[in-house]
Image (cartoon, rainbow, N blue to C red):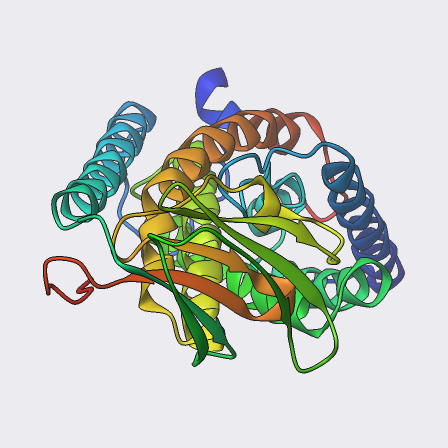
Amino acid sequence: MKCTAYRITLLGVSVAAAMVLSYIETLIPLSIAVPGVKMGLANLVMVFLLYKLDWKHAAAVSIIRVLLTALLFGNAASLAYSASGAALSLIVMSLLKGSGAFSSVGVSMAGAVSHNAGQIIMAVLLTGTREIAWWLPPLILSGIVTGLAIGAVGAVLISKIKLKTD
Amino acid sequence: MRSKAVFGGRTRPKGSLVISMKNRIRNDIILALALLLAALAVWGVVSLTRKTGEYAVVLINGEETARYPLDKDAVVEIETEDGHVNTLVIKDGEASVTFADCPDKLCVKQRAIKRTGETIICLPHKLVIRIEGGGGVDTVV
């Protein structure tokens, strides 16, 4: 891919957008009875990059976002949770997109659910408590709902926003 | 063709199956239903295996540090290694966390627990309150 300056700018803007979305998310608490329920707004940026560029660019932005968000708003534990969630989510989304069998809405939904699953896995490992897996049902449900919503918005962005690299 | 573009059909990777947008949306729905079923299955297993417990066990970093009988009301200050504090209250056979000095206070928002295997978890403090005993069935997930 050419136009390097354009690409660097695009990735910078993507990181900024993902950070702002992560921050907005902390202002709207959804976790009532079940911890970890959130909208996953930052996934919007990942889905967009995955479809407009490729998984490598999405991964780069995701890593920087996770590190910066932990530095600014979190701690070591929250870094572990968001890193495991982000990693699993991106792997699943890349594979499902590569399979060609799902639309970007389905890919986003799978990404949201696997983000939650990744956090649960990390929580089980960190606390040594298998019972945390009991939070899976509500987290799967919230992942389906938020993933579909984010995916629907993402599909519009993917079609409306034209990049030079298209 | 417009709906195809809206759902990101433009970027089909090389070597992948050529599947129409209609079928992709059908696959999305199948995937959503499969995930729903998985959630239901886990929920079913959880609710079928739960019994009222006997003890509230305090685990810090996954290791048991104390246990309190559920049939005796108590208020306990739990201090973790790094000096953080949670307040555990046992009342009417149920355990709940009423105070925590962590920023998100998710453990305080969680409902009181009394069934074997139920947990209240404070992720920032790596603290787990778990109900044990009752029926002799250990927690199996």
Residue found at x 48% / y 45%? A112
Residue farthest along the top direction in this orientation: B2
**Quarter-wise, where is residue A110 in the image?**
top left
Image location (x, y in percent) of residue B20: 29, 30
- Which of B17/A72 is in front? A72
Q: Quadrant of the C terminus of chain A?
A: top right
From the viewer's perspective, is B32 left or right of B64?
left
Image location (x, y in percent) of residue B61: 52, 79
Image location (x, y in percent) of residue B19: 27, 37
Q: Is residue B27 visible?
A: yes
Residue found at x 60% / y 67%? A83
Q: Is residue B9 visible?
A: no
- Which of A40/A56 is in front? A40
Q: Quadrant of the N terminus of chain A?
A: bottom right
**Quarter-wise, where is residue A5 in the image?**
bottom right
Number of residue marks: 0
Residue found at x 54% / y 68%? B127
Image location (x, y in percent) of residue B31: 26, 38
- Which of A52/A143 is in front? A143
Residue found at x 67% / y 50%? B99
